[in-house]
Image (cartoon, coloured by chain):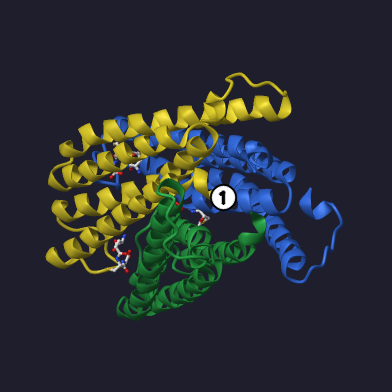
Chain colours: A green, B yellow, C blue
Amino acid sequence: MLEEAVILAAVTVLGVLEQAYFSLQVIYARRKYSVSPPATVGPPEFERVFRAQANCSEYFPIFVTVLWTSGLFFSQGVSSLCGLIYLYGRFRYFHGYAESAQGRLAPLYLSARVLWVLIGLSSLGVFLAFCRVYLNLDLLYGLGSA
Amino acid sequence: MLEEAVILAAVTVLGVLEQAYFSLQVIYARRKYSVSPPATVGPPEFERVFRAQANCSEYFPIFVTVLWTSGLFFSQGVSSLCGLIYLYGRFRYFHGYAESAQGRLAPLYLSARVLWVLIGLSSLGVFLAFCRVYLNLDLLYGLGSA
Amino acid sequence: MLEEAVILAAVTVLGVLEQAYFSLQVIYARRKYSVSPPATVGPPEFERVFRAQANCSEYFPIFVTVLWTSGLFFSQGVSSLCGLIYLYGRFRYFHGYAESAQGRLAPLYLSARVLWVLIGLSSLGVFLAFCRVYLNLDLLYGLGSA
Ligand SMILES: N[C@@H](CCC(=O)N[C@@H](CS)C(=O)NCC(=O)O)C(=O)O
Ligand SMILES: N[C@@H](CCC(=O)N[C@@H](CS)C(=O)NCC(=O)O)C(=O)O
Ligand SMILES: N[C@@H](CCC(=O)N[C@@H](CS)C(=O)NCC(=O)O)C(=O)O
C-alpha cells in the first residue's frame, strides 16, 4: 500500500511545510505590528496576514482529504500534480492577500478550481471502486486502478 | 484495503462537499452584508453564518479522523451510517445557526452525540485490535473485524 | 496494515479526546464569562481560553497528518511516542494560555519542537520509501521499514 502512496505522502509533507511557513509569517507579523495574543485585531496589514493563514488552515484538512481519496481511488500521479498546483496557488494566495485583499482573488480562483478537480476525481474514483466492489462491474478496465 | 474503505470514502467526499457548500454560503453572506475580507465582524446575521462555517470547519478534521478509525478498526457500515447522521446534523446546525443562535443548539446536540458514538467505536475498535495484535487475544470472534 | 497502525490509531483517538476536552472548556468559559455565540470577544480570560482552543484546533490536522506519515513511512513506535509528547505539550499549552498569554510560550516551544521532529521523520521516511520504490535502492536495510 505504501508504494501506491509515496508521492501523495511527499505532497502532503510539502503541504505541512507550507502551513508551518504561514504560521511563522503570522508570528513575525504579530511582532512587527505589536499584536500580542490573544488579540487577533490590529492594523489591516496584520489582519490580512492573520486571515490568509486562517483561511489556508481552514482548507488544509479538506485539501489533504481529497488529495488522498482521489490519489488512492483514482490516480496517484494526477492527484499529486493537482496537489502541487494547489499548494502553489495557496502560496500565491497568502502573499497576494498579505499585500491587499484584492491580491488574494486570482490565486484563490486557481486553488478553488484545483480543489474542485480533486473533488471530482475523488467522486469518480470512489464511484468506480463502488461499482467494482459491490456491483462487480469494472467500468474502466485498468484505468480505474491506475 | 480500498474495498474495506469505499463507503467511508464516499461519506468523506460528501463531507467535503458539505464544507464547500458552507464556504460558498459565507462568500454570499459577505456580499449580501458587505463584509469584505479581512473583516470578520458585521451584522449579527453575517456573524452567525461566519461562525457556523468556522465551527463546522473546526470539527471537520475530528469528524474525518474518527469516521476512519472507527470504520477501519470497528465497522465500515456502522461508522458510515453515523457519518451520514453527523453530516445531516451539521447541515441543520449551519442553517439553524444562520437563523438564530438558539437555532444551532438542537442540531449541535445531535451531531455532538454522534461524534461521541464514533469516538466510542474508535476506542473500542482500537482496543480490540490492540488485544489481537499485541496480546494475541481475539475478544470478539469475527465481530472485531466486521 | 491495521497491525502496523494500531498504536498510531490509539494516539489519534487520544488527540481527539483532548480536542473534545478543549471544546468543552470553551463552552464552560462562554457560560462563566457570558459570551454568547456568535460573539468571540469578551474579557481577556475568555479570549485566552477561546484562542487556546482555536490554536490547538488549527494545528490538529497538521499533527494527525505528520503522526501518520512518519508512523507509516518511518516508525510507528517513535512517532507514537512523539505524538504523546505533543499531546502533553498541547495540554500544558492550553492551561498555560488560559492562565496568561506568557504561560503559553514554554509548552508552545515543546510542542512546536516535537512537530518539527515528526515533520523530519516524515520527510526521511518518505524519502527512503521513494528510493526503495522508484530507484530500487534500500538505503537503510530493515531500519527503513522498522
Ligand atoms: N493563528 C496563530 C498562528 C501562529 C501561532 O501558532 N502563534 C503562536 C505563537 S505567537 C500562538 O501561541 N498564537 C496564539 C493564538 O493563536 O492565539 C496566531 O494567530 O498566532
Ligand atoms: N472563512 C472564509 C470562508 C469563505 C472563503 O474561503 N472566502 C474566500 C473568498 S471571500 C476568502 O478569501 N476569504 C478571506 C478570509 O477568509 O479571510 C471567509 O471568511 O471568507
Ligand atoms: N469554537 C467553539 C468551541 C466550542 C463549541 O463547539 N461550542 C458550540 C456550543 S456553545 C457552538 O455552537 N459554538 C458556536 C461557535 O463556535 O460560534 C466556540 O467558540 O464555541
Q: What is the quadrant of residue C144 in the picture?
A: bottom right
Q: Is mark 1 within 8 Å of ligand 1?
A: no
Q: Which residue is found at the position 31% from the left and 56% from the top? A: B17
Q: Nearer the viewer, residue B141 or B71?
A: B141
Does C132 sit left or right of A50 as displayed?
right
Q: Looking at the image, which residue is at 36% across and 35% down?
A: B82
- Toward the right, the furthest residue is C141
Q: Residue furthest top?
A: B139
Q: Residue at x 44, y 78 (%)?
A: A92
Residue carrying label 1: C63
Q: Is residue A146 visible?
A: yes
- The answer to which image quadrant residue B144 occupies is top right
Pointer 1: residues within 10 angstroms few (<14), some, or many (20+)? many
Considering only vertical position in the picture, is B80 above or below A139? Answer: above
Q: Nearer the viewer, residue A119 or C87?
A: A119
The reply to whether residue A48 is in sight is: no
Q: From what the image shows, is residue C75 above or below residue B27?
A: above
Q: Residue at x 68, y 21 (%)?
A: B137
Q: Which sits in the foreground, A12 or A57?
A: A12
Q: Is residue C84 left or right of residue C24?
A: right
